[in-house]
Amino acid sequence: MGAGHRVRAILAGALTVLLAGCAGAPQAPPGRPALPPVQGGATTGPLRIERVEITFPNGFGSITVPKGGRLTARAVIRCSGNGAFRADWVVDGRVVETVTRTVAYGTTFEVTTSRDALPTFEPGPHTVTLLIREPEPGFDLPVVRYFVVMQ
């Protein structure tokens, strides 16, 4: 046996050992590969909210702003499925802006308040949340806080 044949035999043996070493791996019948069953993915079915994160432009859930300053909030929403999304930005218990969107092939999307949606005319602490009305999430939504200070 020549050197080339020995190398091929050794490589073939190593490959056999490597493949045999896959514990619990199902063995497919010869000539037919084993395929997993077809299942729906994250883009099928009705829209479901999986996670919501709300931050201010500083990247945190709290910020201090001067009286009369401009402030926005951003929500990053992770979801699955397809469907209508309807929510209200709420500051101190009052709706300041409504958001509607059709989500197709749900994964992650962002919702940002308009430039003047968050009031900064009243000094003191304020709370912000995105109250999701459709579809209803199965968890409590986060609340972020901002503090308005006098100049």
Image (cartoon, rainbow, N blue to C red):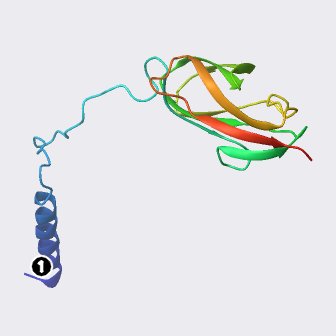
From the image, tell me which residue sits under label 1.
6
- Compared across the picture, whether 75 is left or right of 120 comes to left
Q: Is residue 143 left or right of residue 40?
A: right
The residue that appears at 12% across and 79% down in the rendered structure is: 6
Pinpoint residue 99: horizontal percent, then vertical percent. Answer: 70, 20
State which quarter of the image contains the N terminus: bottom left
Residue 43 appears at what percent x and percent y?
Answer: 46, 26
Front residue of 32/89: it is 89
**Residue 16 location in percent, x, y?**
12, 62
Disc 1: CA contacts within 10 A as few (<14), some (14-19) or many (>=20): few
Task: Out of 56 and 63, give the one closest to the viewer.
Answer: 63
Question: Which residue is painted at 43% across and 22% down in the image?
Answer: 44
**For residue 120, which quarter of the picture?**
top right
Q: Which residue occupies the extreme left position in the image?
A: 1
Where is 139 relative to 62, above or below? above
In the rendered image, is residue 72 in sight? no
